[in-house]
Protein backbone atom coordinates (compact mmCIF):
# COMPACT_ATOMS: atom_id res chain seq x y z
CA UNK A 1 0.00 0.00 0.00
CA UNK A 2 1.31 3.44 -0.89
CA UNK A 3 1.10 6.42 1.40
CA UNK A 4 0.87 10.09 0.60
CA UNK A 5 1.90 12.64 3.20
CA UNK A 6 2.34 16.39 3.29
CA UNK A 7 5.83 17.60 4.16
CA UNK A 8 6.14 20.87 6.08
CA UNK A 9 9.23 22.64 7.34
CA UNK A 10 8.97 25.58 9.73
CA UNK A 11 12.37 26.68 8.38
CA UNK A 12 11.01 27.19 4.85
CA UNK A 13 8.43 29.78 3.84
CA UNK A 14 4.75 28.97 4.01
CA UNK A 15 3.24 28.29 0.59
CA UNK A 16 1.80 31.41 -1.01
CA UNK A 17 -1.01 29.45 -2.62
CA UNK A 18 -3.07 26.27 -2.28
CA UNK A 19 -0.18 23.79 -2.41
CA UNK A 20 2.20 21.93 -0.09
CA UNK A 21 5.90 22.57 0.40
CA UNK A 22 6.33 18.95 -0.64
CA UNK A 23 4.45 15.69 -0.93
CA UNK A 24 6.05 12.38 -0.01
CA UNK A 25 4.68 9.35 -1.83
CA UNK A 26 6.32 6.42 -0.09
CA UNK A 27 10.04 7.15 -0.63
CA UNK A 28 9.54 9.67 -3.43
CA UNK A 29 9.55 13.34 -2.36
CA UNK A 30 8.18 15.95 -4.75
CA UNK A 31 9.18 19.45 -3.65
CA UNK A 32 7.33 22.57 -4.75
CA UNK A 33 9.30 25.47 -6.14
CA UNK A 34 11.23 27.57 -3.68
CA UNK A 35 12.12 31.21 -4.09
CA UNK A 36 14.11 33.52 -1.80
CA UNK A 37 11.34 34.15 0.72
CA UNK A 38 12.06 34.80 4.38
CA UNK A 39 9.37 36.06 6.73
CA UNK A 40 6.99 36.44 3.78
CA UNK A 41 9.28 38.88 1.96
CA UNK A 42 11.58 38.40 -1.00
CA UNK A 43 15.23 38.58 0.05
CA UNK A 44 18.44 39.04 -1.93
CA UNK A 45 19.60 41.86 -4.16
CA UNK A 46 20.55 39.70 -7.15
CA UNK A 47 20.11 36.21 -8.58
CA UNK A 48 23.15 34.86 -6.71
CA UNK A 49 21.83 35.89 -3.29
CA UNK A 50 18.31 34.78 -4.17
CA UNK A 51 19.60 31.39 -5.33
CA UNK A 52 21.39 30.83 -2.01
CA UNK A 53 18.20 31.52 -0.07
CA UNK A 54 16.01 29.45 -2.41
CA UNK A 55 18.40 26.47 -2.16
CA UNK A 56 18.51 26.82 1.64
CA UNK A 57 14.69 26.76 1.68
CA UNK A 58 14.73 23.64 -0.51
CA UNK A 59 17.23 21.96 1.82
CA UNK A 60 14.93 22.70 4.78
CA UNK A 61 11.99 21.05 3.02
CA UNK A 62 14.10 18.03 2.10
CA UNK A 63 15.29 17.71 5.70
CA UNK A 64 11.69 17.78 6.94
CA UNK A 65 10.99 14.93 4.50
CA UNK A 66 13.83 12.86 5.95
CA UNK A 67 16.30 13.31 3.14
CA UNK A 68 18.98 15.67 1.93
CA UNK A 69 20.52 17.14 -1.19
CA UNK A 70 22.30 13.86 -1.94
CA UNK A 71 18.88 12.27 -2.39
CA UNK A 72 17.78 14.68 -5.14
CA UNK A 73 17.09 12.90 -8.42
CA UNK A 74 15.99 15.87 -10.52
CA UNK A 75 15.72 19.64 -10.26
CA UNK A 76 14.26 22.39 -12.37
CA UNK A 77 15.66 25.91 -12.25
CA UNK A 78 13.51 28.81 -13.37
CA UNK A 79 15.35 32.00 -14.28
CA UNK A 80 13.85 35.36 -15.22
CA UNK A 81 17.10 36.27 -17.02
CA UNK A 82 19.31 33.64 -18.64
CA UNK A 83 22.21 36.05 -18.16
CA UNK A 84 22.09 34.84 -14.52
CA UNK A 85 22.70 31.21 -15.58
CA UNK A 86 26.45 31.08 -14.84
CA UNK A 87 26.15 32.79 -11.45
CA UNK A 88 23.22 30.61 -10.35
CA UNK A 89 25.01 27.52 -11.66
CA UNK A 90 27.96 28.27 -9.35
CA UNK A 91 25.65 28.55 -6.34
CA UNK A 92 23.86 25.36 -7.43
CA UNK A 93 27.17 23.47 -7.58
CA UNK A 94 28.22 24.80 -4.18
CA UNK A 95 24.96 24.17 -2.31
CA UNK A 96 23.69 20.97 -3.92
CA UNK A 97 26.92 19.08 -4.56
CA UNK A 98 27.59 15.94 -2.54
CA UNK A 99 31.07 14.42 -2.99
CA UNK A 100 30.89 10.90 -4.38
CA UNK A 101 27.29 11.34 -5.54
CA UNK A 102 26.43 12.04 -9.17
CA UNK A 103 24.64 15.37 -9.59
CA UNK A 104 20.89 15.19 -10.20
CA UNK A 105 19.31 15.50 -13.62
CA UNK A 106 18.27 19.10 -14.28
CA UNK A 107 16.40 21.41 -16.58
CA UNK A 108 16.79 25.18 -16.65
CA UNK A 109 13.93 27.22 -18.01
CA UNK A 110 13.72 30.92 -18.82
CA UNK A 111 10.45 32.42 -17.61
CA UNK A 112 8.84 35.81 -18.04
CA UNK A 113 8.07 36.27 -14.36
CA UNK A 114 8.21 34.52 -10.98
CA UNK A 115 6.13 35.02 -7.82
CA UNK A 116 6.94 38.04 -5.65
CA UNK A 117 9.32 39.38 -8.31
CA UNK A 118 11.91 36.64 -7.68
CA UNK A 119 14.71 36.11 -10.19
CA UNK A 120 15.26 32.40 -9.35
CA UNK A 121 13.06 29.45 -8.40
CA UNK A 122 14.04 25.81 -7.88
CA UNK A 123 11.99 22.66 -7.42
CA UNK A 124 13.15 19.08 -6.90
CA UNK A 125 12.25 15.43 -6.85
CA UNK A 126 14.12 13.33 -4.31
CA UNK A 127 14.06 9.79 -2.99
CA UNK A 128 14.31 9.00 0.69
CA UNK A 129 16.96 6.34 1.19
CA UNK A 130 16.75 3.80 3.97
Image (cartoon, helix red, strand yellow):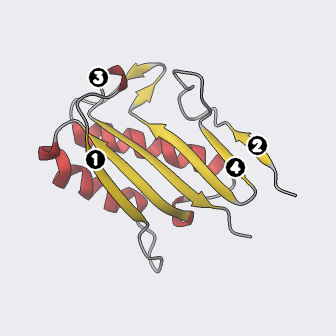
Alpha carbon of mark 4 to alpha carbon of mark 3: how far?
28 Å
Residue at disc 3, secondary structure: helix
Precedes in sequence: disc 1 or disc 2: 2
Res 117 label: 3
Discs 4, 2 touching: Cβ within 8 Å = yes
Indicate the quadrant where residue 41 lies: top left
Pointer 3: residues within 10 angstroms few (<14), some, or many (20+)?
A: few
Disc 4 marks which residue?
Answer: 24
Alpha carbon of mark 1 to alpha carbon of mark 2: how far?
28 Å
From the top left corner, tell me how far across and down residue 126 is, in percent: 57, 59
Does 40 sit above or below residue 118?
above
Give whichever of 70, 109 is nearer the camera. Answer: 109
Discs 3, 1 touching: Cβ within 8 Å = no
Precedes in sequence: disc 2 or disc 3: 2
Alpha carbon of mark 2 to alpha carbon of mark 3: how far?
30 Å
Precedes in sequence: disc 4 or disc 2: 2
Precedes in sequence: disc 4 or disc 3: 4
From the top left corner, tell me how far across and down residue 44 is, in percent: 29, 30
Which residue occupies the extreme right position in the image? Answer: 1
Disc 1 marks which residue?
Answer: 109
- Camera-nearest label, 1 or 2: 1
Disc 2 marks which residue?
Answer: 5
Residue at the spot x=40%, y=34% of the render?
35
Give whichever of 91, 23 is nearer the camera. Answer: 23
Precedes in sequence: disc 4 or disc 1: 4
Amino acid sequence: MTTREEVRSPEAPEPIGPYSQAIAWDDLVLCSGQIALKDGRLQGEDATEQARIAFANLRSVLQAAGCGVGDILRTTLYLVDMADFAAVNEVYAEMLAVPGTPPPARSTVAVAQLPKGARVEVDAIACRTR
